Image (cartoon, rainbow, N blue to C red):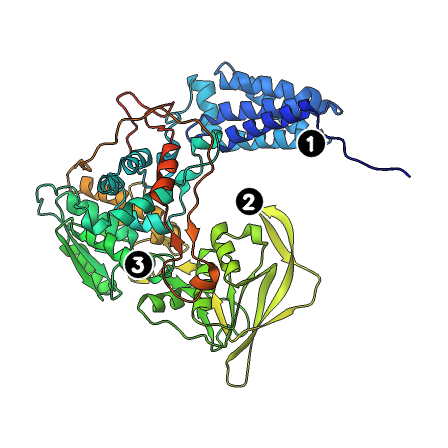
């Protein structure tokens, strides 16, 4: 009898695997601001080292192309070298036998087009393009550029109020971001080179749990300017703008159509993810900045907008994206079919539906879809399913949200495109009919689904919640001359509205399209700075706290501390907070992993640290 076996890896194989892992960590932690020409040259050299040597284009072409890339990166090339590199890359891409050759060449060709300005600077100016330079990754990738190393160090010292004010220097919603931020600051954390990115959101959560935002006094307000600013929209972007303008000494009035402030943080994020009492802490902290007048339940139509623009020195329009999109399928108007935005909005006002004994199907694959599915579970639904036309790994929802929904009993029906909604004689929804899909070619970064040669599937549904996107109610402002593209307000780089009165600025979801809380906050911060300049000022705001001196780095590899959640069987029965914060022991370990890139490394500028608008 012949026995088959797998030979154990040799010591050389193990060393090679370790080297590859270290290289992969370096790629994963590639800092923002690195010159793309230099990065492409390094990746080409790596590709050349991978060649098996069986085909000439890859074996001989990649090393030659890498040499040309090095010449370009060193600012020693000319137009002829660039043309030669492009021609050589096209030949390697079109004639290589395997992906090692043609993918490396294709990536280089895409870079030539994507980073044309950087290549032109290397050729003509003999230097990297303006603005190139590695920076502190967590600060750079945070849309609001919050000083993460600074408040992490303050938390480690036990100065939680100081940590809150360090955050509020750039973001007046420390609690909101401690609960619901998608933490882009962690994407390029240099700690990845050693073990794993810091749990920055978890550290912030620890700080606000011990120093609630409404108990921490904001920095002192500047001298009153007697300038008046109207903010239309009381969501994260509008309130951020109001906060910073108030600290600058301007007099701000916030117009909010709904009964309470908070925007989609109150009317779009379920309480189990972000308890309303914690949102109110941030809002009360913002109101403590002074000279902010709030008018809730005051919807602004075209006539009112003209009056406001004539009355106030400046206006910031931050109305968000609070209209839910619908499905263009048969039966979409049946009773029981509702927008996810409308459902979550009702709950924000305290009107929780009763889905007892009902089958609920949610259409969509984003965070809003997961919010709706988990909300339906808590509303007593008999069964909850998510119908999504792509694969689970293509969902735009955070993986943690998807897994949490599954743990709570939500069934993921992937590769299912909505085709029709069935209704009974009374017009009530009875089922969602879906067309099975198969995954196809990659388009715009994700594999695109196409209809599979399979019969439609009927999903029993008393309630269908549509979570396929949000729209902006721009009509009243368009009547006043503000221009839009695809329903979004047009603005210049300073968020100055295009068309309409000259003193109007726009920002947040109504200008960019639906995005995240932290991006809306960042827009409000930028708008405040630009409005201040428009009014003839250039205020500088201090947070009243300094980051502690950096301690020597601890390079011992540790596991990343993750925030635990209450058991699914318990949490799915209520709308209480699902997350459990860190212990003091855990937060000290996590803070100790910070490498203090603001003090050590290439991100540090002369004088201490980088400055952001």
Q: Quadrant of residue 590?
A: top left
| Nearer to me, 130 or 154 | 154
Residue placed under numbered mark 1 in the picture? 94
Question: Measured from the top left, where is residue 286 in percent x and y?
Answer: 20, 51
Residue placed under numbered mark 2 in the picture? 445
Residue 166 can be seen, yes or no:
yes
131 vs 15, left or right, is: left
State how far apart marks 2 and 3 are (Cα): 31 Å
232 vs 118, left or right, is: left
| Nearer to me, 162 or 47 | 162
- Which secondary structure, mark 1? helix
Residue at the farthest right position: 1
Question: Measured from the top left, where is residue 210 in percent x and y?
Answer: 26, 47
Q: Work out whether mark 1 precedes mark 3 in sequence or the reverse, and give the earlier one.
A: 1
Question: Measured from the top left, where is residue 215 in percent x and y?
Answer: 19, 50
Q: Work out whether mark 2 precedes mark 3 in sequence or the reverse, and give the earlier one.
A: 3
Q: Measuring 35% from the left and 66% from the top, which residue is drawn there?
A: 345
| Nearer to me, 203 or 240 | 203
Q: Which mark is residue 263?
A: 3
Question: Measured from the top left, where is residue 284 in percent x and y?
Answer: 20, 54
Q: Measuring 58% from the left and 59% from the top, which residue is drawn there?
A: 389
Give the vertical position of 482 relative to 296 (above or below): above
Whether residues under marks 2 and 1 lie with C-beta atoms below 8 angstroms apart, the answer is no
Give the vertical position of 2 relative to 350 (above or below): above
Quarter of the image with the C terminus is top left
Q: Within 10 angstroms of label 3, few (less than 14), some, or many (20 or more) residues?
A: many
């Amino acid at each position: 009898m012949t026995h088959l076996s797998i030979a154990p890896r040799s010591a050389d194989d193990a060393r090679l695997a370790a080297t590859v892992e270290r290289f992969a960590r370096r790629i994963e932690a590639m800092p923002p601001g690195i010159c793309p020409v230099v990065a492409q040259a390094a990746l080409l050299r790596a590709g050349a080292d991978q060649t098996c040597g069986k085909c000439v284009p890859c074996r001989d072409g990649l090393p030659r192309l890498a040499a040309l890339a090095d010449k370009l990166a060193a600012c020693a090339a000319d137009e002829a070298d660039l043309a030669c590199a492009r021609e050589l890359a096209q030949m390697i891409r079109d004639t290589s036998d395997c992906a090692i050759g043609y993918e490396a060449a294709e990536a280089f060709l895409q870079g030539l087009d994507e980073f044309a300005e950087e290549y032109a600077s290397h050729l003509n100016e003999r230097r990297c393009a303006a603005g190139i330079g590695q920076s502190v990754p967590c600060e750079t990738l945070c849309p609001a550029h919050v000083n993460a190393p600074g408040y992490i160090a303050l938390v480690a010292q036990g100065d939680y109020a100081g940590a809150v004010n360090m955050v509020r220097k750039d973001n007046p919603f420390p609690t909101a971001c401690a609960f619901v931020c998608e933490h882009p600051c962690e994407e390029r954390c240099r700690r990845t080179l050693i073990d794993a990115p810091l749990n920055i959101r978890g550290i912030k959560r620890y700080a606000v749990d011990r120093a609630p935002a409404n108990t921490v006094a904001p920095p002192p307000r500047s001298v009153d300017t007697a300038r008046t600013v109207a903010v239309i929209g009381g969501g994260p972007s509008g309130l951020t703008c109001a906060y910073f303008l108030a600290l600058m000494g301007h007099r701000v009035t916030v117009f909010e159509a709904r009964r309470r402030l908070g925007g989609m943080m109150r009317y779009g994020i379920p309480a189990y993810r972000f308890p309303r009492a914690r949102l109110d802490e941030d809002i009360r902290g913002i109101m403590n900045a002074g000279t902010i007048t709030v008018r809730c339940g005051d919807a602004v139509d075209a006539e009112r907008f003209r009056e406001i623009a004539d009355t106030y020195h400046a206006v910031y329009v931050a109305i968000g994206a609070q209209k839910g999109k619908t499905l263009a399928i048969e039966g979409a108007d049946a009773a029981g079919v509702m927008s996810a935005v409308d459902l979550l909005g009702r709950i924000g006002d305290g009107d929780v539906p009763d889905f007892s004994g009902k089958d609920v199907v949610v259409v969509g694959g984003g965070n809003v879809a997961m919010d709706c599915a988990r909300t339906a579970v808590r509303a007593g639904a008999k069964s909850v399913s998510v119908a999504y036309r792509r694969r689970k790994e293509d969902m735009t929802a955070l993986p943690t949200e998807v897994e949490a929904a599954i743990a709570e009993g939500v069934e993921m029906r992937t590769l299912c495109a909505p085709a029709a909604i069935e209704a009974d004689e009374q017009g009530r929804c009875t089922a969602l009919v879906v067309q099975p899909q198969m995954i196809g070619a990659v388009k715009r970064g994700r594999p695109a689904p196409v209809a599979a040669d399979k019969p439609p599937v009927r999903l029993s549904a008393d309630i269908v919640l549509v979570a396929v996107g949000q729209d902006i109610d721009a009509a009243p402002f368009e009547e006043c001359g503000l221009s839009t593209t695809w329903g979004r307000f047009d603005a210049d780089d300073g968020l100055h509205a295009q068309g309409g009165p000259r003193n109007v600025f726009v920002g947040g979801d109504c200008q960019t399209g639906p995005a995240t809380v932290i991006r809306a906050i960042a827009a409000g911060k930028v708008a405040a700075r630009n409005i201040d300049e428009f009014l003839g000022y250039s205020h500088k705001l201090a947070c009243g706290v300094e980051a502690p001196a950096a301690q020597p780095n601890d390079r011992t590899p540790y596991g990343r501390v993750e925030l635990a959640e209450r058991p699914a069987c318990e949490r799915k029965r209520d709308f209480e907070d699902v997350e459990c914060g860190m212990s003091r022991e855990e937060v000290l370990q996590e803070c100790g992993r910070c490498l203090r890139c603001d003090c050590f490394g290439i991100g540090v500028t002369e004088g201490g640290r980088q400055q952001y608008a």
